[in-house]
Amino acid sequence: KMINNIVRSIVYFLIFMTLQLLVLNNISFFRVATPFLYLYIILKQPTDLSRNQIVIISFLAGVIMDLFSNTPGMHAAVCTFVGVIREPLFHFFIGKEISEGSIPSYRVCGFGGFFRYTLSFVVIHHTALFILESLILFDPLFLLIRIVSSVILTTALILTVEALNFESSRSGE
């Protein structure tokens, strides 16, 4: 099972980072809503990984985003932050004991639990990222519109991908 989780994590990382960098980074609805589907990589890590392992994976995802998005250190900093809070956030919203090594999904957490976990994770990530980006030109209304619209878009994409994730529903994870 551990080998399967490692392979799954690598495949998710490659697929979602490539999709983010080649397609989604070029999408911006009305110059405010930007989808960050690569967060799915962090959300879907097995529950038995240590906080340090999650932080390393999160940091790597952020560094790769920064390298290809011309955002020096912003994604790395925010992804590291959400990597640190992922475990307590997961346990707060799921609230039940999940078997060791489970992967967060609709099936494991229920739709409501997975939705709350995903939404709170995305809200925290986007708020931190857009506040960090807006330190130079601060417009509170534009910042709020950007956070809300991007949260809605990213959460909808993550929930859609999760609904289409046949592997999760088939294996009971």
Image: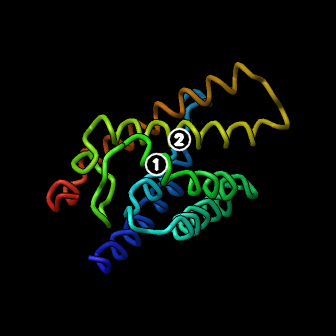
Q: Amino acid at mark 1?
A: Leu
Label 1 belongs to which residue? Answer: 37
Q: CA distance from mark 2 to mark 1?
A: 12 Å
Position of residue 7 in the picture relative to residue 144 (left or right) = left
Q: Residues within 10 Å of mark 2 (few under 14, many from 20)?
A: some
Q: Is residue 22 left or right of residue 142?
A: left
Measured as percent of width and height from the top left, residue 28 is found at: 56, 36
Q: Check residue 133 in the rendering and tell me which mark sits there, or answer none.
A: none
Please identify the quadrant where the N terminus is shown: bottom left
Q: Is residue 170 above or below residue 48?
A: above
Picture quadrant where residue 137 is located: top right
Along the horizontal axis of the image, is 104 left or right of 70?
A: left
**Which residue shows up at 52% across the image and 70% down it?**
53
The residue nearer to you, when weighing 173 against 16, is 173
Q: Secondary structure at mark 1?
A: loop
Q: Which circle's residue, 2 or 1, is located before the other in the chain?
A: 2
Above or below: residue 159 compared with residue 23: above
Q: Residue at x 23, y 58 (%)?
A: 173
Is disc 2 placed on a helix, strand or loop? loop
Q: Nearer the viewer, mark 2 or mark 1?
A: 1
**In front here: 24 or 145?**
145
Residue 70 % position (x, y): 72, 55
Percent across and percent down for residue 98 are 29, 55
Residue wearing tag 2: 27
The amino acid on which the numbered mark 2 sits, given as a three-letter code, is Ile
